[in-house]
Amino acid sequence: MLFSCEQRLDKIQQNNKLSYLPMSVAENINTKHTDSGRLTSVLQSSKMINFSNRAFPYYQFPEGIDLTVFNDQDQPSVVVANSAVVYNNTDLIDLRGDVVLTTATNDTLFTDQLFYDQKKEWLFTDFPVKFRTKDYLTNGNGFDANQNFTNAQVLEVTGRIYIEE
């Protein structure tokens, strides 16, 4: 009788281990997203791990990403990060490690973590940032911007340098 309980416990433990494994792993991905026949984004990464089998599903990019997003005028903005996690249920992307975002107008944001809300098309962080425009280099804590950067702002400015050409 004790033997049969041991076998059952082994089965339960084995099933539990399988639930923590990823659904799939992809290498050297190059994904293009279109909307109404127009290219809207290109995502490149050396590795993507699919955890969509979890109660709170997500995709992990542990070796970094290179994401190009095109605005309505087909101008590219590029985001590079050392790692990223895309959460399916919330449409939130968590970018981490040496995050650099360069806009179509060549404004550049540097930070260690940046979130992108895909539903609201909104970028934000509470981490320290450097934001370079054609006129200023602004240091601070926190950042908010819409996807097109038409209202980008450093939330708590700790320093600003005027750039002369």
Image (spheres, helix red, strand yellow):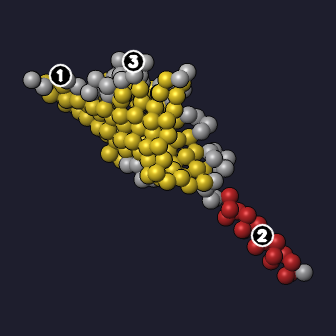
Q: Quadrant of the N terminus?
A: bottom right
Q: What residue appears at the point 73 percent right and 64 percent down from the top-left corner?
A: 15
User: In 3D space, how far apart are the residues under numbered discs 3 and 2 (Cα atoms)?
Assistant: 56 Å
Q: What residue appears at the point 41 percent right and 26 percent down from the top-left corner?
A: 70
Of badges 3 and 1, nearer the viewer stands 3
Q: Is residue 137 left or right of residue 109?
A: left
Where is residue 133 drawn, in percent x and y?
23, 25
Where is residue 104 drawn, in percent x and y?
32, 25
Q: Quadrant of the C terminus?
A: top left
- Looking at the image, tell me whether mark 2 or mark 1 is earlier in sequence order: 2
Q: Is residue 126 above or below residue 11?
A: above
Name, please, the residue furthest toward the front: 37
- The kind of secondary structure element at disc 2 is helix
Neighbor class of circle 3 (other Cα within 10 Å; few <14, some 14-19, many 20+) is few
Q: What residue appears at the point 52 percent right and 28 percent down from the top-left corner?
A: 34
Neighbor class of circle 1 (other Cα within 10 Å; few <14, some 14-19, many 20+) is few
- The kind of secondary structure element at disc 1 is loop
Question: Residue 122 sits in which quadrant?
Answer: top left
**Amino acid type assigned to the residue bearing label 2 in the image:** Lys
Q: Which residue is mark 3?
A: 73
Question: Residue 150 sits in which quadrant?
Answer: top left
- The kind of secondary structure element at disc 3 is loop
- Looking at the image, tell me whether mark 3 or mark 1 is earlier in sequence order: 3
Q: What residue appears at the point 65 percent right and 49 percent down from the top-left corner?
A: 54
The circle drawn on residue 11 is: 2
Neighbor class of circle 2 (other Cα within 10 Å; few <14, some 14-19, many 20+) is few
Question: Residue 144 sits in which quadrant?
Answer: top left
Q: Which residue is mark 1?
A: 135
Where is residue 136 drawn, in percent x and y?
18, 25
Q: Can the viewer see residue 156?
A: no
**Amino acid type assigned to the residue bearing label 1 in the image:** Asp
Q: Can the viewer see residue 104?
A: yes
